[in-house]
Image: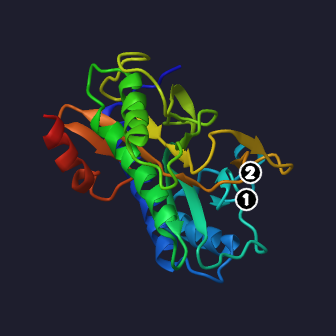
Amino acid sequence: MIQIKSEAELATMREAGLVTAAALAAVREIVAPGLSTQDLDKVAEDVIRGAGGIPSFVGYHGFPATLCTSVNDEIVHGIPSPGRVLKDGDLVSIDCGAIVDGFHGDSAITVGIGDISAEKAELLRVTEESMWRGFAAARLGGRIGDISHAIESYIRSQPHPSGGDWGIVEEYVGHGIGTELHQDPQVHNVGRPGRGPRIEKGLVLAVEPMVNLGSRFTRQLDDGWTVVTADGSLSAHFEHTFTVTEDGPWVLTAEDGGQSRLSSLLAATG
């Protein structure tokens, strides 16, 4: 069932979003070669609990940590570990969620550790920018497919560093979010405009493109959580929680509401 939030509930979700954003900012600040993914997890947990929130992921279907930390060919749902030590040139996706007064925020970033190649930097740029293109395509009265189409269209429009095709992950998608971490509707990263549920005031979505340097295909590791690229290629993942108001998209997990990234995109599209 699709959950529509009141103004008061949206305000609470904004608080959850800001706590999530603060946790990710703290992790981004300290991430460096030599740290383990468990080190990152501890920082995020301390920020969330220090703000009076609850980590969304701990205990979710048995997940054991505050963060999902997915390194290099890991796409999503990587489990933090003291034995997974980051090194120069790695990519690490950091997915975080926080609960405030019963409502969730959900956001993810992928960062390069130390010096990364131009190819890796382009993977990050294309994936993140596609997410913002999806937000910019969202309008009250529009359809979920408008977001999906904007994400896919942007990714496919960008030249691949090796001349191949970007692998847009299809098995794992964005979602509605509110009093549960995952709600209807699904938000695919490929799709046709004008399709899917209507975007209305009070609908809150987590949009999260996942893009591989190689094929789009995936497999799950024996831990029951970690999803990796089937061909061992690198992957990136970005996510924000947002809603659409009469004034346009409002990114609940961005400190500035997303305005610094959205203003020029919205101006360009009228």
Residue at image mark 1: 79
Q: Amino acid at mark 1?
A: Ile
- Residue 120 at x, y = what percent? 51, 63
Q: Is residue 87 left or right of residue 247?
A: right
- Residue 154 at x, y = what percent? 37, 40
**Around disc 2, counting alpha carbons within 10 Å, would you say few (fewer than 14), some (14 to 19), or many (20 or more)?**
some
- Residue 264 at x, y = what percent? 17, 49
Quadrant housing residue 255 = bottom left
Compared with residue 250, is residue 29 higher up or lower down, i.e. above or below?
Answer: below
Q: Is residue 86 left or right of residue 249?
A: right
In the rendered image, is residue 241 in sight? Answer: yes
Residue at image mark 2: 226
In the rendered image, is residue 66 in sight? Answer: no
Residue drawn at point x = 42 percent, y = 20 percent:
192
Residue drawn at point x = 26 percent, y = 28 percent:
139
Secondary structure at numbered mark 1: loop
Quadrant housing residue 210 = top right
Q: Which of the two discs, 1 and 2, sits closer to the camera?
A: 2
Quadrant housing residue 82 = bottom right
Compared with residue 105, is residue 42 higher up or lower down, i.e. above or below?
Answer: below
Verify CB contact (< 8 Å) between mark 1 and mark 2: yes
**Which is nearer the eye, 248 or 135?**
135
Residue drawn at point x = 39 percent, y = 46 percent:
158
